[in-house]
Image (spheres, grey):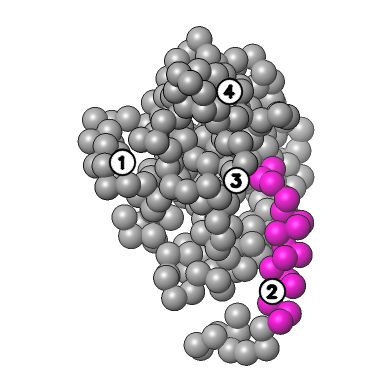
């Protein structure tokens, strides 16, 4: 799929429902990992699976000692569980990271639809409940060569890992738009003439549009083979842009609407709860710092743009 078309799909789905957007983004990521790193046989299996309507995910988060890939006299298999496993027990397949002895983490394709392995009660959160991101016990699932995707270390290989963050940024953008639409509807319904509210709405609109432009360019750069190194830095910096836009839009919306925004039946309540949680992606400040360090050593123009 063209990256800009994919960006629009992620944005529109995220605007409709951030939990669904999270599942869809994981599905896209899982399929892409197999397409990038899988064997020809694995890619053929993926094509048949997608044609059948099966859903994929990517699970990396875990508690110590983590998921291990064990090879013994019987067969290679997994030991351990993943946490925050989106769609646990509901999606069909998940690419999970597992640690073999004496090797870097390896990707393994694991069956993910066994509800008896899922523990949804651990997902006690105020937002994004629809992702069903509970724990999932992988112990005993096969990890023979035909289930292993790529080589050890491929999952965290740069710049692809960092540049790929543009996809969840696109889903977050949809969540920001949902907040902005709810604010607009609330103000328009009351024929609001307060200039302070209009100023907040104008600022929120500008923030949302700025985030859109950053995400759109990030999608294009991340899928340009000639700009992968620059793309990773751009996406790292863009994560902070999208996060700030989201926080400012939510602040503007709740200040304009007031107490009503926190009632369970108000559109802003779930929109802000979901977006507030989905913003909590790993190490946002460290990503911005790394981007700054990378840009500081680039004293040059890239084509017709600075960085």
Counting from the top left corner in percent of width and height, residue 123 is at 65, 22
Q: Judge whether 111 appears above or below 261 on screen.
A: above
Single out the residue that lies furthest toward the top: 116
Location of residue 136 (image quadrant): top right
Q: Give the label on residue 42, or none.
A: 1
Q: Of callouts 2 and 4, which one flags the residue occurring earlier in the amino acid sequence?
A: 4
To which residue does mark 4 refer?
A: 79
Q: CA distance from mark 4 to mark 3?
A: 16 Å
Q: Does the magenta portion include 295? A: yes
Single out the residue that lies furthest toward the front: 73
Q: Of callouts 1 and 2, which one flags the residue occurring earlier in the amino acid sequence?
A: 1
Secondary structure under tag 4 reads strand
Q: Do the residues under discs 1 and 4 have CB atoms within 8 angstroms?
A: no
Q: Is residue 205 visible?
A: no
- For this rendering, which residue is in front, 303 or 38? 38
Secondary structure under tag 2 reads helix
Q: Which residues are magenta?
A: 279-297
Q: CA distance from mark 1 to mark 2?
A: 36 Å
Q: Of callouts 4 and 3, which one flags the residue occurring earlier in the amino acid sequence?
A: 4
Counting from the top left corner in percent of width and height, residue 249 is at 67, 51
Q: Is residue 235 visible?
A: yes
To which residue does mark 3 refer?
A: 104
Give the quarter of the figure containing the C terminus. bottom right
Q: Judge whether 167 appears above or below 121 on screen.
A: below
Between disc 3 and disc 1, the foreground one is 3
């Amino acid at each position: 799929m063209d990256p800009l078309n994919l960006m629009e799909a992620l944005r529109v789905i995220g605007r409709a429902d951030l939990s669904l957007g999270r599942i869809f983004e994981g599905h896209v990521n899982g399929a892409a990992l197999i397409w990038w790193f899988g064997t020809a046989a694995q890619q053929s299996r993926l094509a048949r699976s997608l044609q059948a309507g099966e859903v994929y995910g990517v699970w990396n988060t875990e508690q110590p000692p983590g998921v291990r890939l064990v090879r013994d006299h019987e067969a290679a298999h997994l030991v351990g569980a993943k946490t925050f496993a989106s769609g646990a027990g509901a999606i069909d397949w998940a690419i999970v990271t597992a640690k073999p002895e004496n090797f870097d983490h390896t990707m393994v394709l694991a069956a993910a639809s066994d509800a008896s392995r899922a523990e949804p009660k651990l997902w006690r959160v105020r937002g994004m409940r629809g992702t069903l991101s509970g724990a999932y016990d992988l112990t005993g699932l096969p990890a023979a060569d035909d289930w292993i995707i790529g080589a050890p270390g491929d999952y965290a290989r740069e710049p692809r890992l960092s540049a790929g963050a543009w996809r969840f940024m696109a889903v977050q953008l949809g969540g920001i738009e949902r907040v902005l639409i709810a604010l607009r509807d609330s103000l328009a319904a009351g024929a609001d003439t307060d200039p302070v509210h209009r100023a907040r709405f104008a600022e929120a609109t500008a923030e949302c549009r700025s985030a859109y432009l950053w995400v759109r360019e990030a999608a294009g750069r991340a899928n340009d083979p000639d700009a992968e190194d620059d793309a990773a830095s751009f996406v790292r910096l863009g994560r902070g842009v999208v996060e700030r836009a989201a926080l400012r839009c939510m602040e503007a919306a709740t200040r304009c609407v007031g107490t009503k925004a926190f009632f369970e039946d108000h559109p802003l309540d779930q929109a802000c709860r979901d977006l507030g949680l989905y913003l909590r992606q790993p190490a946002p400040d460290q990503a911005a710092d790394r981007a700054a360090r990378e840009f500081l050593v680039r004293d040059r123009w890239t084509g017709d743009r600075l960085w």
